[in-house]
Structure formats: structure tokens, C-alpha cells
Amino acid sequence: MMDGGEHEPWPQHVLRAVLAAEDPTVRLLAHLLYYTAQRLGDVLRMTWSDVATDRVEVRQDKTKKRLSIPVHSALSAELAKHERVEGAICRTPRGAPLRDDNARKMLKAFSAAAGAPSVPHGLRKNAVIALLEAGCSTAETASVSGQSLQMVEHYARQRNQSTLADAALARWESKP
């Protein structure tokens, strides 16, 4: 077991639901966590000045790594729904920067209401698995998440074998 316990990925139906949540704060948090593969604290420290049209600049608190991550089209569409103001991207309905404990409670409440209690860090695992299942190498995945190659491989244990087999055969069949 890892420090702080093992974090499970969110079930796919709950992941789809949170990415389409009616609550704009929950939806934005989920998009930032999932499409950047970052920790909650790093997402909450993101400011609008960290986001360009095509990249998100992140300095991870835990590792001190600086990352420049391409903005996924789904994240770009979600960010476009929110007003760009000075400071933090994630805010309370009153406009104050969202605190870790409140963000954590919101996401845990959403997943519990969807029938699968989950923690925010599970969305990081979902992102790593999605990148790997999309055919990204361990190194490519680590360049997005900022994790070590060993940690990406640890998270990779929960990849969907059937999805990987589909991708492998599609690539194989596309070869001349």
C-alpha cells in the first residue's frame, strides 16, 4: 500500500457524470483534475495566468516539477464557460478561491450521490489510465502527470485489458 492509502479510479459512469455535472464548480474541478492529471492542491493553485490557449503551466508542490501540459479540447471547452478573473481558476460561488477541504467535500459528495464514493485523487488515476489506454507510452504519460515512470506503471495495473487489446489490434491492422 502507498503512503496515504491506495486511491481507486472513479468508475466510468461516475467519471462521465462528474464531467457533465450541473454544478459548474464541481464540473470545472473534475475537468482540471482529469485533463491535467494533477493533484487537487496543484489544481487549486492554478490561476488564469497559468493557462494559455493551448497549454497549462503547472509547478507541482510535492515534486517541485515544472510542467507545460497541452490543453485537452474538453478542458478548453470547459474553461471557456468560466470568467477569466485575476487569481485562482477554482472559486466558490461568491468568488473566493476554493479551499482544499471544500473542494474535497464537493467531489466526495458528488461521487457518493452517484453511488460510488471516491476521492479527488482517483481522477488522477483515471487520467493516467486513459492516457495509457489511448496508446501513450509510460514516459509520455509521466510527462503529463509529472509522476515517476514507476508510479505510472503502478497506476497502470488497473488499465482495461480489453481496451488495450482493441487499440493494439487496430494499430496492427493499420500497418501495411
Image: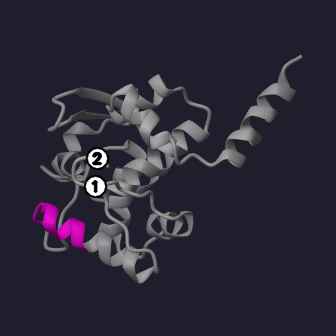
User: x, y percentage for residue 99?
Assistant: 12, 63
Q: Find the residue positioned furthest to the right.
A: 176
Residue 79 seen anywhere in this rendered image of the structure: no
Residue 159 seen anywhere in this rendered image of the structure: yes
- Which residue is at 62% across, 49% downward? 160
In the rendered image of this protein, does residue 45 appear above or below residue 59? Answer: below
- The residue pinned by badge 1 equals 5
The tag on residue 2 is 2
Secondary structure beneath label 1:
loop
Q: CA distance from mark 2 to mark 1?
A: 5 Å
Query: In the shown orientation, is residue 83 left or right of residue 145?
Result: left
* Residue 103 colored in magenta in the image: yes
Identify the image quadrant of residue 148.
top left
- Which residue is at 26% across, 47% downward? 39
- Which residue is at 31% across, 60% downward? 120
* Circles 2, 1 touching at the beta carbon (< 8 Å): yes
The residue type indicated by label 1 comes to Gly
In the image shown, does 165 or 98 lie closer to the viewer?
165
